[in-house]
Amino acid sequence: MNAALSGIFAIVAALLFALSASLQQTAARGEALTGPRRSPARFLLDLVRQRRWLAGMAANLAGFGVHAVALRLGAIPVVQALLVAQLLFALPLAAFRRRIRLLRRDWTGTALVCVGLIVLVMQHISHETLRSQRLAPVLLGVAGLVALIAAAASCIPVRHTQNRAALFGIGAGCCSAMTAVLVVVGTEALPLITWPLLAIALSTLVSGLFAQAAFASGSLPTAFTAMTITDPVVSYLATAVLFVTATRPNPLQLVVAAVLVTAGVVLLANSPTLHDERDRTVTPRDPARLPPE
């Protein structure tokens, strides 16, 4: 029963996150392309003044609350994998906004993702005892990785928009996975206030900053692809290292699920339906329209 409820809450969270990403990417990318080059702090201040971006933030906060309930009821790898459904919701949102029809590749990618998620959910993955001595080293390791990703993305020329968006998206996916782990660990200790519970605010903040950088740097498909593939992969690895699992899933079926979901994500995320045509206007000869560093 808990697993079914967890799945429902995860799908609702995916819908809210997709709505948030659509609104915030439109605002962030539009601000980056049309405004003068600014410092990151000034850029964020300009975003906060936009109603569309604020509406996206409200949807994101609501999604975080629903996501936390899903994590409390279910297993981290399953919940994080179900968040791939963000792409399924992002497609009709993009089609409605641009007044176009979904393509055949959209339906094919949707089918692949759905079948892959069904195979994954059927594994009945669960986790029980936390290996608490491993928590701090794992979090520090991921933090170091995220810092390296941020440094690498900052070294890429601004005109290479999609490479920057992909790297920032990977960083956001890593932070999102760590937030999921901290939510599970921190809420289990309630009503006691422990350091993992307090660390949720930091991981969520860093994840949000990386996501905004990804949205501002390139197209929604590039940022979404990086986030939606990185998050469940890092979540599964973190769960395997940090928790004593009650059940062991079939490795072959996990590989099949991963291949199906990845193929579907690549098809969906690179669909013309999601592409923002304004990205094509950015060229090396037009520095005034480039996003801020």
Image (cartoon, rainbow, N blue to C red):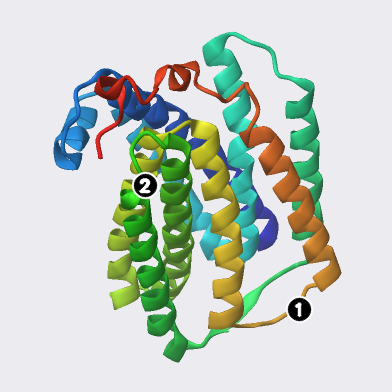
User: Which numbered tag is attached to residue 13?
Assistant: none
* Amino acid tagged 2: Ile
Question: Which x, y percent locates residue 79?
Answer: 60, 57
Question: Which x, y percent locates residue 15?
Answer: 55, 36
**In the depicted view, which residue is nearer to us: 26 or 188?**
26
* Amino acid tagged 1: Arg
Q: Visible in this render: residue 152?
A: yes
Q: Residue under label 1, please give it.
A: 248
- Quarter of the image for residue 89 reads top right
Residue lying at the far bottom of the rendered structure: 133
- Quarter of the image for residue 257 reads bottom right
Packing grade of label 2 (10 A; few <14, some 14-19, many >=20) is some
Decide if residue 58 is on the left or right side of residue 174.
left
Gap in angstroms between the C-alphas marked 2 and 1: 41 Å
Up-down relation of residue 203 to residue 219 (above or below)? below
Upstream in sequence: badge 2 or badge 1: 2
Up-down relation of residue 52 to residue 6 (above or below)? above
Q: Residue under label 2, please give it.
A: 156
Q: Residue at x 63, y 55 (%)?
A: 81
- Quarter of the image for residue 128 reads bottom right
Residue lying at the far top of the rendered structure: 99
Q: Residue at x 20, y 41 (%)?
A: 40
Up-down relation of residue 226 to residue 72 (above or below)? above
